[in-house]
Image (tube, rainbow, N blue to C red):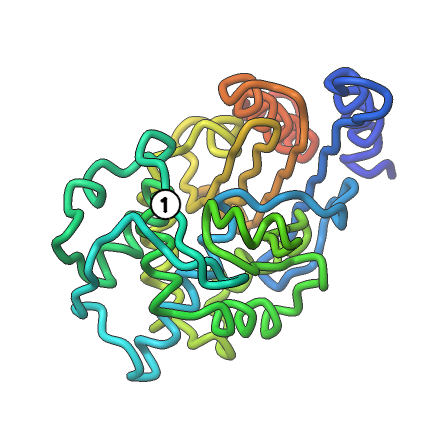
């Protein structure tokens, strides 16, 4: 019996070739589909490394809640809001650009305070850059690395710096992901992985992910109304999404799609949605509800 994905690889390879900007700059498309135990059902170049963009906010918020549950942090702790941060490379100051962010609420609080809970919420639901860097300063890179280690991520999954830390970037310190590793992290959320803190840590994280306002990638490729909890990330030339999907009447699954492709933001999001739609249709025969 043929696999439901028997012709998906060739279609995805064709789509990747079609979106290559030049032979010397090939597009990279990665897909990981798996269950909540982290077992893959389908993979397409899933171990290719991509710049992380905002998907690095997922393990960061897990790390924050782990420290809260351990009693080391308090969600009500006030954090002074500033748009200036110290580089992890040499301590030099750098400023975030408010115009590149999607979080006017936190930016409006400059010079005031926001709680850890508010920062985590904005980092996930609105993909806030300023909230992310403020949270990272409190939580610490080592705690994020612990999350990746516990989940079993590959060495290609790295959270090495905050958002827009140019000095660190120039020094080669970066944030990278693979579709497979993002899938493993999200699967751990879905199964309430005990070694990450179980329900106490991961139930509120999934609840935040389900309140995500940026749902134009993987969720947009699924049948309307399908419950999802997702974290996307995008910059020019990069667009990713990882979603925990709980279809009514079916087993939950995780779908991660990473693209490094020369498309504008809107077209790249539509491309990811198309991939999600193709993956869904591969497992659902004609005649079932299709997006």
Label tally: 1
Residue 95 as seen in the image, left or right of residue 146: left
Q: From the image, tell me which residue sits under label 1.
A: 95
Identity of the residue furthest to the left in this view: 112
Q: Quadrant of the N terminus?
A: top right
Q: Residue at x 60, y 53 (%)?
A: 174
- Residue 30 in the image: above or below residue 217: below
Identify which residue, 153 or 286, lies in the foreground: 153
In the rendering, at what x and y percent does residue 14 appear?
81, 20
Q: Label 1's element?
A: strand
Residue 28 as seen in the image, left or right of residue 179: right
Q: Residue at x 67, y 35 (%)?
A: 283
Badge 1 density bin: few <14, some 14–19, many ≥20, Cα 10 Å: some
Residue 116 as seen in the image, left or right of residue 177: left
> Does residue 196 appear anywhere in the picture?
yes
Where, by quadrant of the figure, is residue 181 drawn?
Answer: bottom right
Where, by quadrant of the figure, is residue 128 drawn?
Answer: top left
Identify which residue, 86 or 16, lies in the foreground: 86
Q: Residue at x 46, y 48 (%)?
A: 163
In the rendering, at what x and y percent does residue 216 appear?
45, 27
> Does residue 249 appear anywhere in the picture?
no
In the rendering, at what x and y percent does residue 150 appear?
59, 74
Q: Residue at x 31, y 44 (%)?
A: 211
In the rendering, at what x and y percent does residue 176 appear?
63, 51
- Residue 252 in the image: above or below residue 236: below
Residue 23 as seen in the image, left or right of residue 124: right
């Amino acid at each position: 019996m043929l696999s439901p994905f028997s012709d998906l690889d060739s279609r995805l390879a064709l789509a990747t070739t079609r979106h290559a900007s030049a032979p010397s700059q090939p597009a990279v498309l990665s897909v990981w589909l798996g269950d909540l135990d982290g077992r893959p059902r389908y993979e397409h170049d899933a171990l290719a490394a991509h710049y992380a963009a905002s998907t690095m906010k997922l393990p960061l918020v897990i790390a924050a809640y782990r420290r809260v549950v351990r009693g080391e942090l308090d969600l009500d702790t006030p954090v002074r809001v500033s748009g200036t941060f110290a580089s992890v490379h040499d301590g030099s100051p750098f400023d975030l650009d408010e115009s590149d962010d999607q979080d006017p609420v936190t930016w409006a609080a400059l010079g005031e305070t926001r709680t850890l809970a508010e920062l985590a919420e904005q980092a996930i639901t609105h993909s806030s850059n300023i909230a992310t860097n403020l949270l990272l300063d409190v939580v610490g890179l080592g705690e994020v690395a612990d999350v990746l280690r516990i989940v079993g991520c590959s060495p290609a999954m790295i959270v090495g710096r905050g958002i827009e830390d140019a000095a660190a970037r120039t020094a080669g310190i970066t944030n990278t992901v693979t579709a497979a590793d993002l899938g493993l992290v999200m699967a751990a959320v879905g199964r309430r992985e005990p070694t990450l803190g179980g329900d106490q840590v991961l139930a509120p994280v999934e609840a935040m992910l389900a309140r995500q306002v940026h749902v134009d990638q993987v969720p947009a490729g699924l049948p309307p109304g399908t419950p999802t909890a997702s974290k996307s990330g995008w910059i020019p030339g990069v667009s990713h999404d990882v979603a925990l999907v709980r279809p009514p009447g079916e087993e939950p699954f995780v779908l991660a799609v990473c693209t490094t492709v020369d498309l504008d933001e809107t077209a790249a999001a539509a491309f990811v949605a198309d991939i999600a739609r193709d993956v869904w249709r591969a497992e659902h025969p004609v005649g079932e509800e299709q997006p």
